[in-house]
Amino acid sequence: MKKGLAICVLVILLGVGLFYRTYSIGDDSYWIDESYTVLAAKQIGEEGVPRFDSGEYYWRAWPQTYALFLVGSVFGYGHAPMRILSAIAGTALIAVVFFVGHRLYGTPTALIASGFMAFSHYQIAWSRQARMYVFLEMFFLLTLYWYLRWYEEGRSKHLAYALASALVAYVFHAVALLLIPIILAHYILMRWRGGLSIVRSGLAGWRRPTVIVCLVVIAAVMYALYVKFSGVILPQDYVDEYRVFLYRSQQFFVFFAAVGLFAYPKNTRRNLLLAIATAGVFCVLALLVKYLNFRYLFILLPLLYLLAAQGVLYVVTRYPHRWYRTIAAAVVVVTLIAVGFLSLPQSEYPLEPMTPQPPFAEAYDALQGRLGEDDLLIVTQPAIAELYARKPDYWIAISYVGVPVESAGLYDSATLTERYTGARTLATAQSLERVIRDNQGFVIVDDMGLQRMTNEQRGIVLNLTRVGVWGNVFWSRTYVYEFR
Amino acid sequence: MERVTRLRRVVDDVFGDLSIITLLVLAVKAIFHPAFLIDFNLQILLIPILVFGAARAVLS
């Protein structure tokens, strides 16, 4: 393929990708997790560090948080400024996939994979969120790429790039720790004979101080990781949930990734790393991580698309006849359109199953002018309230992380302060009833909040005067109740 | 040696045909939604693809 044509197609894909990622980017309300990131960025302005009023620090993805603080200082903390960095990173990721695909598999595969990235519903959706996942995905991919370059060429600068990428990926999200077993598994599998001799020689020279120091460091790191994640890493069985999600949402790509894995024998060794990474992330998430979060599978999509691109290229170029290639390419495009892959840009994208995306912004807008100084604000999502109105007076204790609220660490049981805003916690139905009886104000909840209250708490809220409901899809609705 | 070459060619052909069949099945299902394909568990197609793919990688 001519270089000029490839660059031209890539530029078009980047343009289209940016358009999809920024189209009406400010329309959708912040969803729950976005509110933590944006609130942490705002807090930097007051505290100098990402520290909430509750006293808790928010160091996860701190480069993004500081960058959002800078953007917010100039352009304000509106939806569009807070999301634009992710949109730019999501667009840049298309170029990164092209770069990686081009170096590993050649230009046609790189262009097809970039096309998948540009139009992928999930890529677009998560690139429009003020969250860290698209940055994590980028550095996760770059780590695998630089490791592969180091493995094949043995140049230490590539290893340095891989380590730096892995570190940056870890700064954005701890899921990046999965890179360690993935890379180790690939290395051992590819070099198992050499690896065994390294182990044997290491054992033979166990008195050597370097070996002992290495063992101590590895043990210390393993122990630190165990202590840090012992509450999260527990035996689970989410295999069916993740498998069904991946299969239903990425069916075309799952099949063609299987084809692509073996389509070109010269690529099989490289593809093995992508396959190990995909299987490794999937197995750890499904079998060991306490929380069921489909968004963690998001980091696998570039790998899936790089494999699937090889599969598509293989099928389309299976026979040399021009008519065959034209028809096969047309069938691929029509199939992608039929499965809804090549859809028009939307202002709202569903993120994943069971993630509530209620229109909080509309509800708080409607409350403007009605919320007086004497009115109490009682909510189930306090960070959202602080962004759209003011710091809430009370938080109705509900768990939104999949474990009982008592053990979820969402509030301090001694001081009853909520984890993020430091709002006072209403942990029981009696305390909620007492506050409502003696005061006036508003209760703002969403479907998840209502569902996860106790029956007594829910009964109290539903007996109040309903001001309005925003949203028309279950699990993504906001309710405002008034008490006088 | 000749038998291996012949076997490799057979495996190559089957893998290639399987990949085209996969595309056609996915296309028919996505475009026409025929009842027999809606109810059919397509995941079973992955097994021959992976088996012949692995055989192809081993033989090449």
Image: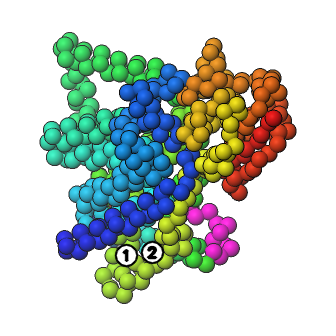
Chain containing mark 2: A
Task: Please tell me in which quadrant of the rendered image residue A189 appears.
Answer: top left
Q: State which tag comes first along the sequence, 1 or 2.
A: 1
Q: Given the current orientation, which residue lies at the most extreme bottom position?
A: A323
- The amino acid on which the numbered mark 1 sits, given as a three-letter code, is Val
Q: Are marks 1 and 2 on the same chain?
A: yes
Taking depth in this image into account, of A50 and A113 the one nearest to the observer is A50
Residue in the image at 22% along x and 18% along y: A211
Taking depth in this image into account, of A423 and A380 the one nearest to the observer is A423
Residue wearing tag 2 = A332
Task: Quarter of the image for the C terminus of chain A: give it.
Answer: top right
Residue in the image at 35% along x and 17% along y: A220
Indicate yes or no whether the magenta region holds residue A394.
no
Disc number for residue B5:
none
- What's the magenta region? B33-49
Q: Where is A449 relative to B11, above or below?
A: above
Taking depth in this image into account, of A458 and A112 the one nearest to the observer is A458
User: x, y (%) of residue A205?
Assistant: 19, 17
Contact between labelled residues 2 and 1, with CB atoms less than 8 Å apart? yes
Q: SS for tag 1?
A: helix
Disc number for residue A316:
1
